[in-house]
Image (cartoon, coloured by chain):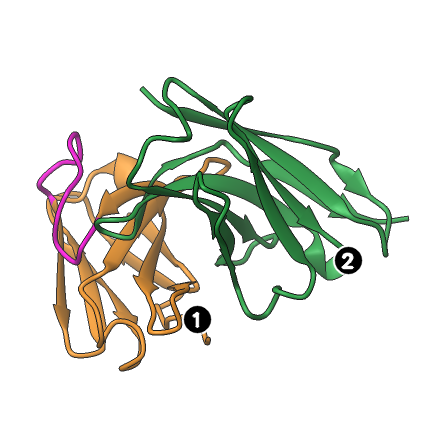
Chain colours: A green, B orange
Amino acid sequence: QVQLLESGPGLVTPSQTLSLTCTVSGGSITSGGYYWSWIRQHPGKGLEWIGYIFHSGSTYYNPSLRSRVTISVDTSKNQFSLNLSSVTAADTAVYYCARDFIADDAFDIWGPGATVTVSS
Amino acid sequence: QSALTQPPSVSGSPGQSVTISCTGTSSDIGSYNRVSWYQQPPGTAPKLIIYEVSNRPSGVPDRFSGSKSGNTASLTISGLQAEDEADYYCSSYTTSSTWVFGGGTKLTVL
């Protein structure tokens, strides 16, 4: 079955860019009917949707983060990536990649999460 | 887009039923049946347990059920088991074409 796995640096310096990649295995990212999303969870807090990408490359972002977020896709590697610029300590969180089934707008598959700490 | 409102905690004894509420607005829960619920045991990723208000993915016990009335959705867990102890989050699609989550509810099985 489809599995997701996040990868990237666990420590990012303030004002720099946070970069994470989600590798999709067990299925193709070009399968129709799905959005591929990034969601984060601040320590001890709830979940926050960051944005999604379709395999065609079309994206949509949370308005609160839109000015700093870029999500891209590499279909040849079956991966999609998150770039979050100008990070501060407030961006310290566990970052999840997740698959959204468009027909019901539910996140049916999640990666295990990547902990990212913003600190000098 | 403000987060959906959930009670911080609920508790129940094994075998009992508990209900977790999730209150939104006419811009999210009130506009769509695109409400989902997620179970998150400590240190793990969220797991989808309810989608489209009341549907259960394959493998989720029928002890978990969902409903919606107006701007409020609810998750009911009947026949509580120790393994149900976890954080639970609701989510809704919104009229802004985004997703919003609740703040989470910690379920304690006494």
The quadrant where residue A1 appears: top left
Is residue B69 found left or right of B87 in the rendered image? left
Residue B47, given in percent of the width and then of the height, sits at 34, 39
Residue B103, given in percent of the width and then of the height, sits at 44, 64
Residue at x-position 35% and y-position 68%? B6
- Answer whether labels 1 and 2 touch (C-beta < 8 Å): no
Magenta: main secondary structure: loop
Within 10 Å of the Cα at label 2, are there few (<14), some (14-19), or many (20+) other Cα atoms?
Answer: some
The quadrant where residue A101 appears: top left
Residue A107, given in percent of the width and then of the height, sits at 34, 45
Residue at x-position 38% and y-position 66%? B97
Instruction: Specify the amino acid type for callout 1.
Output: Ala
Q: Is residue B63 visible?
A: yes
Answer above or below: position of B105 versus B50. Answer: below
| Nearest the eye: A49 or B79 | A49
Indicate the chain on which mark 2 is placed: A
- Which residue matches tag 1? B3
| Nearest the eye: A116 or B80 | A116
How far is disc 1 from disc 2 in space, using C-alphas?
21 Å
- Which residue matches tag 2? A89
Residue A79, given in percent of the width and then of the height, sits at 54, 29
Tell me the SS state at disc 2.
Answer: helix
Is residue A114 found left or right of B19 in the rendered image? right
Q: Which residues are magenta?
A: B51-63
